Image: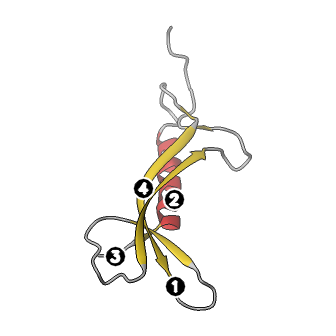
Amino acid sequence: MSLIKLSDAIENLREELRLAQEKGKNQSLQFDLQSIELELEVIAEGESGVSGKINWYIFGGGVDSKIKDASKHKLKLTLKAVDATGQPIRVSQLQEQLPG
């Protein structure tokens, strides 16, 4: 089983949100994305050497004893979603007002 780096998982989430924003451009129903809460099981794997670097990977099950010096943790991230200018992200652009 291959492990997924935490940074790659967050990059994938970023791309999925960008796609949702693009697909919602012409939709009448819109959503403001306030925050994103992720709760992940991750593996902290230490690298030997002078740097003492720790790599974080998403835990997907099936990880066996081949991974040495690794420990499993729960990681909870709350991300505030903003665009490149720091403005809140709208998943779709409102083209028409909904009744009500």
User: Of the residues shown, which amino acid type is indicated by label 3?
Assistant: Ser
Instruction: Determine the image quadrant of residue 60.
Output: bottom left
Callout 1 touching callout 2 (CB < 8 Å): no
Kindly identify which numbered label has been placed on residue 47.
1
Query: On the image, numbered disc 3 is attached to which residue?
Result: 2
Say which residue appears at 41% left-offset and 76% top-offset: 70
Marks 4 and 1, how far apart at CA: 21 Å
Which label's residue is closer to the chain start, 1 or 3?
3
Callout 4 touching callout 1 (CB < 8 Å): no
Going by the picture, which residue comes out furthest to the bottom?
49
Marks 2 and 4, how far apart at CA: 11 Å
User: Of the residues shown, which amino acid type is indicated by label 4?
Assistant: Leu
Q: In the shown orientation, is residue 70 left or right of residue 48?
A: left
Which label's residue is closer to the chain start, 1 or 2?
2
User: Of the residues shown, which amino acid type is indicated by label 1?
Assistant: Glu
Marks 4 and 3, how far apart at CA: 16 Å
Marks 1 and 2, how far apart at CA: 22 Å
Marks 1 and 3, how far apart at CA: 17 Å
Query: On the image, numbered disc 2 is attached to which residue?
Result: 10
Say which residue appears at 42% left-offset and 81% top-offset: 69
Residue 25 x %, y %: 53, 37
Query: On the image, numbered disc 4 is attached to which residue?
Result: 40
Marks 2 and 3, how far apart at CA: 17 Å
Kindly identify which numbered label has been placed on residue 56.
none
Mark 4 is surrounded, within 10 Å at the Cα level, by few (under 14), some (14 to 19) or many (20 or more) other residues, namely some
Residue 40 x %, y %: 42, 55
